[in-house]
Amino acid sequence: MKENFKQPIGLTQAEVEQRIKEGKVNRAVNDQAKTTWQIIKENTFTYFNLIFLVLAILLVIVGEYKDLTFLPVIIANMIIGIVQELRAKSVLDKLNVMNTTKIAVIRDQEEKIVSIEDLVLGDVIVLKTGDQIPADGQVISGTLRVNEALLTGEADEIEKDVGAELMSGSFVVAGKAYARLEKVGKNSYVSKLTLEAKAMNSKEGSEMVRSINRLIKWVGIIIIPCGIALFIVARYVNHLNLADSIVSMEAAIIGMIPEGLYLLTTIALALAAMRLARSQVMLHDMKSVETLARVNVLCVDKTGTITEPKMEVEKVIPVSVTKEELSKEISIFAQNMPYDNATIKAVAKAFNQKFNIQATQIIPFTSVNKYSGAVIKNNTLLMGAPEFVLRDQFKNYEKEINQYTRQGYRVLVFGKYPHALRDEKEKLVEPVELLGYILISNPIRKEAKSTFEYFDRQGVNIKVISGDNPLTVARVAKQAGIRDADKLIDATEIGEGDYEEVVKKYNVFGRVKPDQKKKLIKALQKNGNTVAMTGDGVNDILAMKTADCSIAMASGNSAAVQASQVVLLDSDFARMPKVVDEGRKVVNNIERSASLFLVKNIFSFLMSIFSLAFAMSYPLRPAQIALISAFTIGLPSFLLALENNYNRIRGKFIPNVLSRAIPGGITDMLAVSILVVADMVLELGRPEVATTATMLLVAVGMMVLYHISRPLNKFRWTVLGGSFLALVLSIIFFHNLFALSRISATAVFLLLVLFFAEITIFRLLSKFADGVREVLVAYDQKGKDLTINDVKQAYRKGRNMVNMSVPEE
């Protein structure tokens, strides 16, 4: 690659300020970070809040003020949501400012480092290996090799000389150049792609968020026609007065709305993001926390993940020359090469003798060739991967090279090619004179072994995918404690149609090219896995964008950091268990809380259908629904969401939630339906039926809370006890507020009979639902391989297990 290099004159500060005034800045478009107004608006002006406002106005019109008790809960939820999201935004904004991508720019004829968002139209930027091109521009000095795969899907590296166009979003593989920005901000090529990508990502979401959105969507569709129908039955069939008809209808609608579920999910994700930010982990997408918690295959790169990002030359072994001659040749090579990667930096540090010998041509390292070179007179000094430099000669040295790779070294060969190569596209056709070996090591990260042991305990399979020799990679993987590190393969031997099979058999992949990393990730996904990919280099980006969740080391290049969903700001891989634990805490606690919310929703829906089918008025009042919501759902779900629950996620969100909620919802509906039918004979009256029904719902609510909290620990006993005490005190001291009246001896007897019936019904339904849930978990794990015997065993296991979640003390 030709060097055509001189520093141009950039903009003056006055020109920069003028362009900022004109709005010609490189501000990101459609940024995922919400503004303060967006947070307030999204928590205030919601579809359900509009419905609650209409319901409140109707109650005020008919003078039923005591049934407005649901409003304080709604307002409190709204305020808590706004405050928590604003707190999370504050922490994340500070983090983004501290860790925004920087780039070198020429201003006032000096090189300065600025944020990419501070660039303006016409700025002259300095691009080097690993940089992501921040805006569209043109090379005005120097030469680059650029990978546009993120934009075009093609992994080929394209040479960019003076006058060549650069597209934002592509990244520099090799070289150094100056470029003038011609399109910035919303006018740049990548901005259009960013808008499309973010629109797509917002639709995809995570499984939990998608599931909750679907639930809320269907509830939103159902409640309006259902409410109108209930009002018509109460007013025109049962001939209740206007106030009682509105109160009856509103109780049903309020019961069907999961008012706190979406709020609780948003808060839980925001708090998780905030806690991770304080632990030096930045999320580009909050929902990636849940995805990572569901991961069962983690793909890691050797360098920078298992090992420290730095490299050290351990030994140099001469082959055809003396050690002194070899050191001299390597020094000449190193002093002529640009220091644009960790390998050449390590070599240059070890071989730092100075010689007045200038290379006439530099051959940059590419991921295709896997070697770099310096043309000295009529020969080319080469350094790179043994198989790629030696080619057919490799078999003559293979035994000796493998001896070093088994010891954990990365082996580079250093040789002399008898011709002057013109550029990196020119193939090696003549034999290379092997001068010697350079043995390089990456120290294993101190925390790597304990981190991989954690993932092994959690049932997460580790796949090591590296461009290095598979024997070297396997040795390092074994030292790091990765299971089955001896199951290795050279990626150059993988056929085009073999990827789905090899990912099942092997755990260590060496000599992997960037496009192969992507194919390996896709093959793992086709086999039904949720895949995360960690990396820190340009060669990891294609795979990171393909994976379900991508994690970058901040010490890596800016392109890898920008392409990832999760960034480890201190490049400490030991943070990974913390990220997974946060995701599990969110999902496990939201699943449990969602079950509490849906019991009320399922009951209200079924009771509404029952009321419409038999032309009866809905038996409860909004104030009574508010009591049940506050102390059997709202308070306990908020408290339980604070618990550290790091158990492995099993099964899908919707089946897990419904299997815990349906038994309670059906039990509620059967008990209250029997009570309503009994009232036709006993003529208890509406106030007495409503109070008795409230007591029945409170009892079932506490049973459901007990069931999903098992096995109980001190914290869960405290939540149960606190919720029960709050209920008792509210009934005793605030019975008028919650529209509760004294009940007769007949109603008390009926309450006791139905309560004991509830216990039996709930126990039977819960055992059946637990069995079904375990069958669905087994199906989720085994898919079409599930047998009848597996179904029977899973069902028995579900019926007999106390609870899937074992509390962490």
Image (tube, helix red, strand yellow):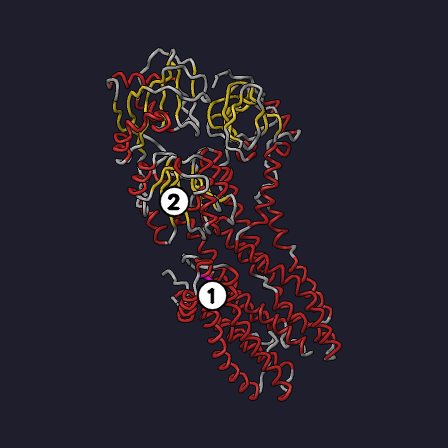
Magenta range = 772-778
Q: Is residue 646 left or right of residue 182?
A: left
Pointer 1: residues within 10 angstroms few (<14), some, or many (20+)? many
Tell which residue pokes out farthest to the left in this image: 322
Q: Are circles 2 and 1 on residues that touch, CB within 8 Å?
A: no
* Res. 1 visible in picture: yes
Tell which residue pokes out farthest to the right in this image: 236
Judging from the image, what secondary structure is the residue with disc 1 in?
Answer: helix
Q: Amino acid at mark 2?
A: Lys
Quadrant in the picture for residue 315: top left
In the displayed structure, would residue 776 be above or below residue 766? above
Give the label on residue 205, or none.
Answer: none
x and y, in percent, of residue 227 in the image: 69, 69
Q: Amino acid at mark 1?
A: Arg
Pointer 2: residues within 10 angstroms few (<14), some, or many (20+)? many
Mark before the other along the chain sequence, 2 or 1 = 2
Residue at left offset 40%, top offset 44% = 502
Q: Is residue 743 left or right of residue 720?
A: right
Q: Is 463 included in the stretch rendered in magenta?
A: no
Residue at left offset 25%, top offset 22% = 318
Judging from the image, what secondary structure is the residue with disc 2 in?
Answer: strand
Quadrant in the picture for residue 791: bottom left
Number of dots carrying numbers: 2
Picture quarter with the C terminus = bottom left
x and y, in percent, of residue 292 in the image: 45, 49
In the displayed structure, would residue 357 be above or below residue 237? above
x and y, in percent, of residue 133 in the image: 54, 29
Q: Which residue is mark 2?
A: 463
Q: Which residue is mark 1?
A: 773
Q: Main secondary structure of the magenta part?
A: helix
